[in-house]
Amino acid sequence: MEPERKLAETPIGGVEDHSDDGEWKKVALLRELVEVQDPDSKEVDDLMLRRFLRARDQDVNKAAAMFLKYLNWRKTAVPNGFIAEEEVETELAQKKLCIQGLSKAGCPIGVIFAARHFSSNRDMHVFKNFCVYVLDKLCASIPSGQDKFIGIVDLKGWGYSNCDIRGYLAVLDIMQNCYPERLGKVYLVHVPYLFMKAWKIIYPFIDNNTRKKIVFVGDKNLKDTLLEEIDESQIPDIYGGKLTLVQ
């Protein structure tokens, strides 16, 4: 199962709580529905079910179908319950990800260096495992009272050799369908014009909820934009903040 953190029913730390008695009743209905079809659903807390419910706009049947598909995926993709570091050594060696700092709301921050990813030497199975490894690590870093993470995708130096449409779509599929309502916001920084060609291909596959969370940031407004969500002490120094990234 995706690593879970128990949250208070009245979240703190900047989580906007839209829940009411009606939503929790739907969560109870969702639980009844999924537990009948897959007993493993009993291991999951109501907050996880609520995320799937919200991802399907409160439609219990659609949320149940999405959740049961997720359970089947998890059993196959992560049979041991977690991805071990040795399974993704080649990806980790590229040092294309840092998880450091918290937003003002308490969301953990992941910084991705897209120019360190090369499609020519990417093994899709290992890459998917790496995505799960990263997403699980981010989720495990979420403090009590919060349920989302923030991403900064740094595209400085990105070129044709880094373009990996199949890889990007795989990441998108895993995040949207297996980790719904976990992404709080993602900032795309140092975006080269060339990347927009890839963006046009990827964009139709991004669901509406995710689209609202994507922010393209111009170089001139980089620090000021990040300051809206992140204290200067938690902004990486490469973006004008005071946090030294450990890579």
Image (cartoon, grey):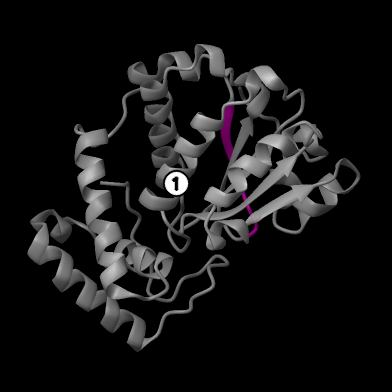
The quarter holding residue 158 reads top right
Callout 1 amino acid: Met
SS type, badge 1: helix
Give the main secondary structure, helix, strand or loop, of the magenta stretch: strand
Question: Where does residue 235 sit, x and y in percent of width and height?
Answer: 72, 43
Q: Is residue 35 left or right of residue 70?
A: left
Q: Which of 206 and 108 lies nearest the eye of the viewer?
A: 206
Say which residue label 1 marks: 175
Between residue 134 and residue 245, name the one nearer to us: 134
**Is residue 114 positioned above or below 150 on the image?**
above
> Residue 11 vs residue 59: left or right?
right
The residue furthest bottom is 21
- Judge left or right: residue 198 versus residue 168: right
The residue lying at 46 percent from left, 42 percent from top is 138
- Residue at left 50%, top 30%? 167
Please state, as top left, top right, bottom left or bottom right, where the C terminus lies in the image: top right
Over which residues does the magenta segment extend? 97-104
Residue 117, position in %: x, y?
A: 59, 21
Residue 108 shows up from this direction: yes
Q: Position of residue 35 (x, y in %)?
A: 12, 64
Is residue 235 shown above or below 112? below
Name which quarter of the figure residue 73 lies in.
top left
Q: Is residue 121 above or below residue 131?
A: above
Q: Can residue 78 be seen by looking at this rendering?
A: no
Identify the residue at image location x=38%, y=76%.
Answer: 58
Q: Is residue 57 magenta?
A: no
Image quadrant of residue 114?
A: top right
